[in-house]
């Protein structure tokens, strides 16, 4: 039986999609404030959509276990989405604060891990210092960073993803040659009996 495997393959479509992501990333970086607002609105609508689906799914649990927890979680997500849509500035501030805390915490954890692993000490210290400094910059300039951080992160991510896709392609499910030849041999062997 052949087993599907993941393999990196690059095609012309990967080059085109990667170039498109690269261009989109540059445009986003040029309009980081607009990108931040659009991403907060997109996240708000996704939360509203998820909250409505969770509430609808909770209706199927009436009389069964889990109704109240499903209904409550769906309602909370719906309210959070509506708050994001109603006040994008506060939502952007909250997400920026969260990003700053994540950067700072990840940086401190990497710096602590660097003392335990002598083999990876240099990369861990380097990435830990960068992440810690980035977290401190965001947290100490929270109000200035609010309207540009999310858009900047989205733009940088799009650029890196586009370059990665153009250079190495995307993961695809392929049949392994060994398992295909083994399957053909097995089928040929079974037909002789």
Image: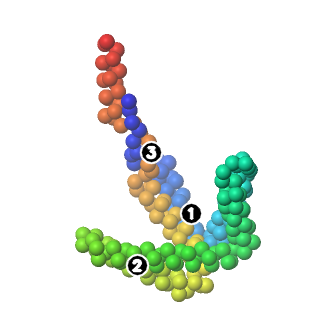
Task: Choose between 113 and 64: the one closer to the eye.
Answer: 64
Mark 1 falls on what kind of element? Answer: helix
Color encoding of the figure: rainbow
Mark 2 falls on what kind of element? Answer: helix
Say which of marks 3 and 2 sits in front.
2
Q: Earlier in the sequence, mark 3 or mark 1?
A: 1
Query: Any mark on residue 182, and which?
Result: none
**Residue bearing mark 1:** 24
Give the alpha-carbon distance from disc 1 to disc 2, as whole Å.
32 Å
Instruction: Please report the residue visible at 35 percent of the width from the left and 77 percent of the height from the top.
Output: 112
Task: Spot the residue most to the left.
Answer: 118
Q: Position of residue 176 (x, y in %)?
A: 36, 37
Give the alpha-carbon distance from disc 3 to disc 1, as whole Å.
24 Å
Residue 114 found in image quarter: bottom left
State left or right for residue 81 relative to residue 121. right
Could one spot residue 186 in this view of the protein? yes
Give the alpha-carbon distance from disc 3 to disc 2, as whole Å.
36 Å
State left or right for residue 93 relative to residue 134. right
Q: Earlier in the sequence, mark 3 or mark 2?
A: 2
In the picture, the quarter occupied by the C terminus is: top left
**Residue bearing mark 3:** 172
**Residue bearing mark 2:** 108
Task: Choose between 25 and 180: the one closer to the eye.
Answer: 180
Task: Spot the residue most to the top.
Answer: 193
Residue 55 found in image quarter: bottom right
Q: How many marks?
A: 3
Instruction: Please report the residue visible at 40 percent of the width from the left and 54 percent of the height from the top.
Output: 168
User: In the rendered structure, are the residues bearing label 3 and label 2 in contact, judged by CB atoms less than 8 Å apart?
Assistant: no
Mark 3 falls on what kind of element? Answer: strand
Say which of marks 3 and 1 sits in front.
3
Q: Position of residue 61 (x, y in %)?
A: 70, 49
Q: Earlier in the sequence, mark 1 or mark 2?
A: 1
């Amino acid at each position: 039986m052949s087993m599907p495997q993941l393999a990196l393959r690059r095609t012309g479509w990967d080059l085109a999609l990667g170039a498109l992501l690269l261009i989109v990333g540059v445009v986003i970086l040029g309009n980081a404030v607009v990108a931040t607002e659009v991403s907060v609105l997109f996240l708000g609508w996704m939360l509203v959509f998820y909250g409505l689906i969770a509430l609808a799914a909770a209706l199927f649990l009436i009389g069964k276990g889990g109704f109240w927890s499903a209904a409550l979680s769906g309602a909370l997500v719906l309210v959070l989405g509506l708050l994001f849509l109603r006040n994008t500035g506060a939502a952007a501030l909250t997400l920026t604060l969260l990003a700053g805390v994540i950067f700072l915490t990840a940086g401190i954890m990497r710096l602590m891990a660097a003392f335990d692993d002598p083999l990876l000490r240099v990369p861990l210290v380097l990435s830990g210092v960068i992440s810690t400094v980035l977290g401190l910059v965001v947290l100490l300039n929270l109000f200035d960073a609010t309207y540009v951080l999310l858009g900047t992160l989205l733009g940088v991510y799009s650029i890196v993803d586009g370059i990665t896709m153009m250079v190495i392609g995307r993961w695809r499910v392929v049949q392994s040659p060994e398992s295909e030849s083994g399957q053909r041999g097995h089928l040929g062997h079974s037909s002789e009996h």
